[in-house]
Amino acid sequence: MNEYLIPVLLIVLAPVIGGLVYGFDRIVKARMQRRIGPPLLQPFYDFLKLADKRQMMVHSTHAFLGIMHFVSLWFALAVLLLGGDLILVIFLHLLSTSLLILAGYSTRSVFSHLGANRMAISVLAYEPVLIIIAVSIFMINGSFDTSVVFASDQPLLYKMPLAFIALLLILPIKLKKSPFDVAEAHQEITGGVEIEYSGLFFEAVYTAKWLDYIFCYTLVFLFAGSNILLGIGLVVFTFFYLAALDNSTARVNYKQMLRFSLGVAFTLAFINLLINSLI
Amino acid sequence: MNLASYRKKSPWILHFNAGGCNGCDIEILACLGPKYDIERFGMINTGNPKQSDILLITGPVTKRTRERLVEIYAQMPEPKVVISCGACASTGGVFRGMYNCEGGVDQFIPVDVYVCGCGTRPEQIIDGVVQALGILEKKTKALEESVKLKKEAWQEDGQLNRRNIADEIKPLLA
């Protein structure tokens, strides 16, 4: 019973923790730019304000797909934290992303279509790397279950450092951070797929972004195994790495992103897989 | 829980240049920079009418932008407030009475706060936004409509186009 307590608490509180992480992220980003930045609870103020707006929707399928994106992402996170199959987790996450892509295509807005196109391309960029990392974990542990990874004494970081570097390289694509934020690109296509959402329905997409933070940091935490201190260290390092990267780089176009992720990150993950399978 | 009190804490701004000289726009962007940093009040420059609360308009309304202005205003979900930034947006400014210019924003959509100045100072813009937040808190979710609804541009212009002018001039030149 006790072993399930922490994962279940994490799953139930995931949107709240994700919101705090997002708020802290905004503060850190502002401090790096020598600004004061918004208060820590800013994402929740946004949330409560959006609930009070007049409700507008493009059509019901569009709104439904947005809400299902949130629900399926939360489900993927639950499977990951409860020790489910890693491949299943990756594909559930892919499902939730593809629901948002479908929502992007279902409207007539050009920006929404562009965003959906770019999001599909960014899925193409990070998904193979994630799969290769999952397979490397299988090579070491003999199981895809994350419960085995959470329970193992020896951290994966020491056995597959190259895979961790590959994960660090694709995390900006997944979290839509600069330099790989073509899918969102606020200055170019003003948010891409989320452009047609408003009010209560935008909240689903906005909150899903917080859940994505928790999802990605849990993936990072996987590399520490049962060593909680190391895990926290890795997560904190990744947090500041992402904030610094976001502030110091400019957006690249989707071709460069694809070339980089499939050329560098995928190669690193694949070399790592080869080494793991040889040893 | 009174949700209306949270409107003050996260006003998202949409900035629209209706055809001005770009002076006020630069001042608005200066508000976002490190010196004035309006993000500390939770304000974001969204660029998306469907998710924003405050419409900041700079520049006089021209014959080309008036329909876009009304369209953007209609796309914003209520409650919303409109701030006209600068002399041009408020009255037409130095462009008033020009052949391509309609004048102030308030002929087309209801304006809540007028900010003076050519170009407006960032401090003035922040003052205007703070005043607008007080208005935003009292607003309801009832539908607000533009003052002047859309009309076909050619129907009410009364403006001669180049071909007409050429036809008039031709006999004089001959």
Image (cartoon, rainbow, N blue to C red):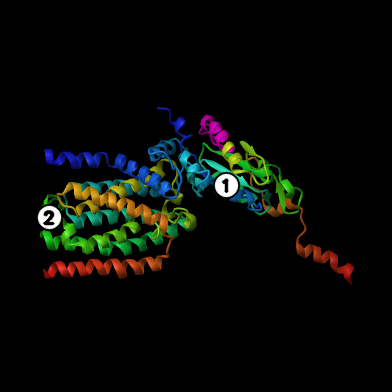
Q: Nearer the viewer, residue B71 or A26?
A: A26
Residue kind at label 2, given as amino acid type = Gln
Q: Chain of mark 1?
A: B
Q: Please give left or right for residue A170 compared with residue B97 in the image.
A: left
Would you say residue B134 sits in the magenta stretch? Answer: yes
Q: Please give left or right for residue B84 compared with residue A28 in the image.
A: right
Residue B1 occupies quadrant? top left
Residue A279 occupies quadrant? bottom left
Residue kind at label 1, given as amino acid type = Ile
Q: Chain of mark 2?
A: A
Disc 2 marks which residue?
A154
Q: Nearer the viewer, residue B50 or A248?
A: A248
- Secondary structure of residue under mark 2: loop
Q: Is residue A117 above or below residue B14?
A: below
Would you say residue A201 sits in the magenta stretch? Answer: no
Q: Nearer the viewer, residue A132 or A75?
A: A132
Place of residue B15 in the rendered image (x, y in percent of width and height, measured from the top left): 56, 47
Question: Which region is colored magenta?
Answer: B128-145
Place of residue A204 in the rendered image (x, y in percent of width and height, measured from the top left): 36, 44
- The overriding secondary structure of the stretch rendered in magenta is helix
Disc 1 marks which residue?
B28
